[in-house]
């Protein structure tokens, strides 16, 4: 049997040892899916708090229940380590490290580079390595491949198999999970994709093979760019509707009744999270290197980035109409997570809304059932979620709904509040009909 055939057999028989590099929002659910399928999984992360928690059977990710982790750890299917030398014993590795932006807006590749440096130290024949982190097209072939083959002397597609497979986690979602969301797989060679698809196919319902790693990298960027641009479009529509005196929410509802050729997106105070506002900029950065300007991405990014400023200008106007000034007014922000019902604040537009409100002299408090406190980078303060919601709603000059968590009793909030700016249409018809409410 060739190395490829032996490795595929080992993977299909679940005798291969799996390593997951990076145990965050993407890596931990993936580790759990492989462990549940019957593999022995080793999670590897330099964050010793995560490693310790996992080895104690405790989950730190909202979507992964502690009972699931505890059961797998007890059964010896899931372990974690901060020591990368465990890679010596690993046959199949998924890399799920962060891919943020630098302060300059350029891709920060340092996490992928350091993960690949670690893998390169211990890489061996008969190994399959899959990059899951969202990145610019060409990363797998131009950056990863030489790091893993130049010193090892391993032949790609014969001894070593390298692929890109984009993660599609949607935190908080219950219907589409790591198991049942189809997974795209593109290899450096077709043999690479064959091995990795055999591996993922054991634990994930549908694996969709594409012909190259670049096609898989680009597919992920298309998905996220599609979303970013459509959100940008509907955000601009909200601004245009305001100028025209038309209710944007009614317009979206009406357009949404078309059963074909239309997909509903809703406006809001800006884009948040680790993916949608960031990933398309990896593509535009790569295109700039090739002297091509990714115009749609730049434009949507500009509109979306400006939404917190637009929201604050609308709050200013609405308070002015009520004979109030923002300076010295008590403003209560409801929801700071970047989307409803999750505990992730990364890139949340709430951070910018709060900073801008503070800059205008407002006395800002916030409440979020999922975010007990956060560090405000703009003024270097730590903000704590207020403990008693309803008295704070009653005391506020303005309540600003930034994230429409389901846990809120919006009817009760409307009753107690003096004025609400609803940037998500969380109040729906209640807000439309109330003189106390201004909607985005
Ligand atoms: N969170 C999402 O919803 C989501 C969805 C789709 C895609 N993605 C993509 O998946 C990737 C990971 O995102 P995430 O949300 O899981 O990030 P995360 O910050 O939650 O987790 C990343 C983990 O990697 C660890 N890490 C850092 N350097 C490492 C190294 N050299 N070796 C091993 N581990 C290392 C960190 O300690 C952290 O635990 C990103 O590229 C992101 O764009 C995320």
Image (cartoon, rainbow, N blue to C red):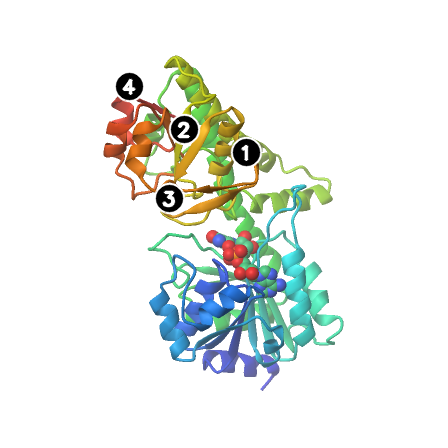
Separation of residues labelled 3 and 1 (CA atoms): 19 Å
Q: Nearer the viewer, mark 2 or mark 1?
A: 2
Q: Nearer the viewer, mark 4 or mark 1?
A: 4
Q: Quadrant of residue 98?
A: bottom right
The residue drawn where x is 47% and y is 26% is 362
Mark 4 or mark 1, earlier in chain = 1
Q: Is residue 330 visible?
A: yes
Mark 4 or mark 3, earlier in chain = 3
Mark 3 or mark 1, earlier in chain = 1
Separation of residues labelled 2 and 3 (CA atoms): 20 Å
Residue situated in front as seen by the camera: 96 or 392: 392
User: Is disc 1 placed on a helix, strand or loop?
Assistant: helix
Residue picked out by circle 3: 340
User: Mark 4: few, some, or many residues within 10 Å (few <14, many ≥20)?
Assistant: few
Q: Quadrant of residue 295?
A: top right
User: Mark 3: few, some, or many residues within 10 Å (few <14, many ≥20)?
Assistant: some
Mark 2 or mark 1, earlier in chain = 1
Residue picked out by circle 4: 435
- Classify mark 2 as within 8 Å of ligand 1 or not, answering yes or no: no
Q: Which quarter of the rendering shows the N terminus?
A: bottom right
| Label number found at residue 331 | 2
For ligand 1, give the image quadrant.
bottom right
């Amino acid at each position: 049997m060739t190395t490829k055939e032996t490795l595929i057999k080992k993977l299909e028989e679940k005798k291969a040892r799996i390593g997951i590099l990076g145990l965050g929002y993407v890596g931990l659910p993936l580790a759990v899916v492989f462990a549940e399928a019957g593999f022995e999984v080793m999670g590897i992360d330099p964050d010793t708090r995560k490693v310790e928690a996992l080895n104690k059977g405790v989950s730190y990710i909202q979507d992964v229940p502690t009972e699931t982790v505890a059961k797998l750890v007890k059964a010896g299917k899931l372990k974690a380590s901060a020591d990368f030398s465990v890679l010596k014993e690993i046959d199949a590795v998924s890399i799920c490290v962060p891919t943020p932006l630098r302060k300059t807006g350029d891709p920060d590749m340092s996490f992928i580079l350091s993960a690949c440096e670690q893998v390169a130290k211990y890489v061996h024949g008969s190994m399959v390595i899959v990059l899951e982190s969202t990145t610019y097209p060409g990363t797998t072939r131009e950056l990863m491949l030489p790091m893993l083959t130049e010193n090892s002397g391993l032949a790609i597609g014969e001894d070593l198999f390298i692929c890109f497979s984009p993660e599609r986690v949607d935190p908080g979602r219950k219907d589409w999970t790591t198991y049942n969301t189809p997974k795209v797989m593109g290899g450096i060679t077709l043999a690479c994709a064959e091995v990795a698809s055999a591996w993922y196919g054991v634990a994930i319902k549908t694996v969709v093979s594409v012909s190259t790693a670049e096609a898989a990298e680009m597919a992920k960027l298309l998905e996220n760019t599609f979303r970013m641009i459509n959100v940008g479009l509907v955000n601009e529509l909200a601004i245009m509707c305001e100028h025209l005196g038309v209710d944007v929410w009614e317009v979206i509802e009406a357009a949404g009744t078309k059963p074909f050729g239309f997909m509903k997106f809703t406006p809001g105070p800006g884009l948040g999270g680790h993916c949608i506002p960031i990933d398309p900029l990896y593509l535009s950065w790569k295109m700039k290197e090739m002297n091509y300007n990714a115009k749609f991405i730049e434009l949507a990014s500009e509109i979306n980035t400006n939404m917190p400023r637009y929201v604050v200008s609308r709050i200013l106007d609405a308070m002015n109409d009520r004979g109030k000034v923002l300076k010295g007014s008590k403003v209560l922000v409801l929801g700071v997570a970047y989307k409803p019902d999750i505990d992730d604040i990364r890139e949340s537009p709430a951070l910018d809304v709060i900073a801008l409100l503070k800059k205008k002299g407002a006395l800002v408090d916030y409440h979020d059932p999922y975010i007990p406190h956060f560090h405000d980078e703009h003024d270097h303060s730590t903000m704590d979620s207020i403990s008693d919601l309803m008295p704070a709603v009653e005391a506020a000059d303005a309540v600003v709904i930034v994230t429409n968590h389901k846990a809120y009793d919006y009817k009760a909030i409307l009753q107690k509040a003096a004025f609400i700016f609803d940037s998500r249409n969380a109040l729906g018809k209640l807000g439309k009909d109330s003189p106390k409410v201004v909607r985005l």
